[in-house]
Amino acid sequence: MPQGAGYAAQRTDGLAIASLVIGILSLLCFWICLGIVLGPTAAIMGYISRQRIATSGGAVGGGTLATVGLVLGILGFIGSVLVFILYVSGLARSSSTG
């Protein structure tokens, strides 16, 4: 067997990478309520990616990336919802006192 020949490296699922990137964006942009859209997108992509990785039989990797993207997407969504609720309650208070 020639030196350097062997098995191909495990490829990372592209959906896991996309989930991680969008999850990071949802967490960074939660204060302008972009997490309401980006958060569920990252969570769904992470969930689907984890299923694809599990059924690949070891041919596809990136399970950790998918999990982190899923969690960040959920956190970004929750943060955006909280910011939205605080914004609406602040508007209600300012209009009732005026």
Image (spheres, rainbow, N blue to C red):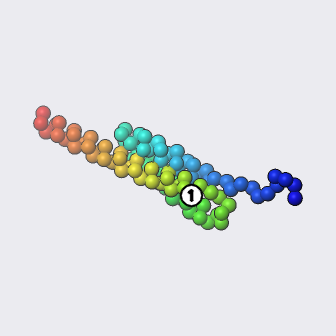
Choose top left, top right, bottom left or bottom right for residue 88: top left
Is residue 40 visible from the viewing direction of this image? no
Query: On the rendered image, what quadrant is the N terminus found in?
Result: bottom right
Choose top left, top right, bottom left or bottom right for residue 35: top left
Extreme residue toward the left, this view:
97
Is 62 rendered above or below residue 94? below
Q: Position of residue 73 (x, y in %)?
A: 44, 50
Extreme residue toward the right, this view:
1
Extreme residue toward the top, this view:
98
The amino acid type, in three-letter code, at marker 1 is Gly
Which residue is nearer to you in this view: 31 or 58? 58
Residue ID at (68%, 61%): 59
Is residue 28 visible from the viewing direction of this image? yes
Is 45 rendered above or below residue 31? below
Q: Position of residue 29 (x, y in %)?
A: 41, 40
Residue ID at (22%, 40%): 90
Total numbered labels: 1
- Is 7 positioned to the left or the right of 53 in the image? right
Residue ID at (13%, 39%): 96
Q: Name the element at disc 1.
A: helix
Residue ID at (67%, 54%): 11
Q: Position of residue 94 (x, y in %)?
A: 17, 36
Is 45 rendered above or below residue 84? below
Q: Residues within 10 Å of mark 1 (few under 14, many from 20)?
A: many
Q: Position of residue 98 (x, y in %)?
A: 12, 33
- Is 87 positioned to the left or the right of 94 in the image? right
| Residue pointed to by mark 1 | 63
Which residue is nearer to you in this view: 53 or 35? 53
